[in-house]
Amino acid sequence: MVVSFHQWALRSFLAGAYTEAMRYALLLALVAASGFGAAPLSPQDAPPKPATDPRVDTSKVTTLPRPEVTTVADLVRTAPPAPVHRTAARAADVPTSEANHAKARQAIERGLAYLERVQAPDGSFFVGKDITPTDMEPRKRAASVAVTALALKAFAQADRLEGDAGKRARAAVERVLADEQALAVATGGGVGNYVMSAVASGLAAVGDADATGGAARAIEWLRRNQWDDGEGLDATTDWYGGAGYGNGKRPDLSNTQMMIEAMHDAGVSPEDPAMQRALAFVARTQNRKASNPAAWAQNGSGDGGFVYSPANGGESFASEDAGEGRYGEKIAVRSLRSYGSMTYAGYKSLLYAGLSPDDPRVKDALGWISRNFTFEENPGLGQQGYFYYMHAVSRAMHASRLDAIADAKGAARDWRTEIIDALAARQREDGSWKNGTPRWEESNEDLVTIYCVLALQEAIKPRVTAE
């Protein structure tokens, strides 16, 4: 009887079909089913270690020494930056000049007005659009839910939830979350991590009880999608702690940083085991000899920047762009190149996971940022992924709690002013943005405009505090 109730409870939780009145009984039943408080199992009674998930090609997985970074407690740590879900109404709260604040707000309003005009009647965005995941799987259509959730976040952060566009976007996201069949299509379409990370962040920005409950359901999906002991992987494997697109795809930093960002936005503690596992994966993506034992890192520049993935021996799009091969396979001594979008993604992930600015990994990441500080391009990739880069920069800089960055020449750079100027200069007459270099869907105005609105909003959010 306990087992059947446990199974019902789990199904009910995943479907969101439980009420406040049932929570206490549900908790008691789950505790009883888990055997909490019983005598510890002896080795012979312990359940066997799960077999490695058959979707993992073990011939490609690199085994490394157990990582130094396995838990937050191992590191130089501090309270992480608190999530901030609204822009500042006054320039003084940012802080920035009145002129900068006004310029950003104007660009945001024009961007949101464009999004309102192109929104589908059912509230969604990116309807019927194809997307090519970075690992080159066939084109999928589940991305509409993710893009709609990101648009919802943009409306929420601008306090536009009561307008028709904000209401429709929220309804579109919640409609999918409430429909098991639709949710299965969205998460099983090849980009599930992208979808559920965006849903968690979007609903967390809405912030009321119903939205918070929906965000929590999305976070639980992300936990299950993370590569860890449940799939037979331990901390010595290069997949451990990371997130991939879904459907068994190998993990990468882009997906993992989205998962970490979603957990941060939803208020998940850095002490949470999923955050700690993700931190181990992120650390193995850093081009840093002192903390990354992977061969590509030991052979590399040790510049403190980040690459796309440490999995299966490592890969970097900057290496590919430099003619060295995506896996560094075209050079005699294999190494990988750091690049902008992944370095900012890694830097903010370390901060969200509770690392202090005094931690050597964080210091070295900021060192790379300082030496390569620019808003003209995505360093290492030129204009490829430029607007994704700008969004990552804005999130990372806000999380840094720094008002200025010293560049390679030692000059203080006001990141807020420069982000606002760079994006305002690229905004088109109709309020949208578009990248002339189309890689990673950046020729699509809807997606890119959402990236830019979100980046501008980070630039005029109140200065972040510790949690």
Image: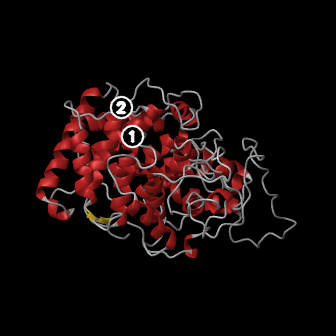
| Secondary structure type for disc 2 | loop
For badge 2, the amino acid type reads Gly
- Sort mark 1 into few (<14), some (14-19) or many (20+) by Cα contacts within 10 Å: some
Residue 448 falls in image quadrant: top left
Residue 48 falls in image quadrant: bottom right
Q: Residue at point 67% right, 47% down?
A: 7
* Front one among 182 and 442: 442
* Front one among 253 and 297: 297
Q: Which x, y percent locates residue 246?
A: 59, 41
Q: Quote the CA–CA distance across marks 1 and 2.
A: 8 Å
- Image side of residue 75 versus residue 151, left or right: right
The residue beneath circle 1 is: 383
Q: Is residue 312 above or below residue 371?
A: above
For badge 1, the amino acid type reads Gln
Q: Is disc 1 in contact with disc 2, using a CB cutoff of under 8 Å?
A: yes
| Secondary structure type for disc 1 | loop
The residue beneath circle 2 is: 436
- Image side of residue 139 versus residue 56, left or right: left
Picture colour scheme: secondary structure
Q: Which x, y percent locates residue 460?
A: 23, 55
Which of the two discs, 1 and 2, labels the residue nearer the N terminus? 1
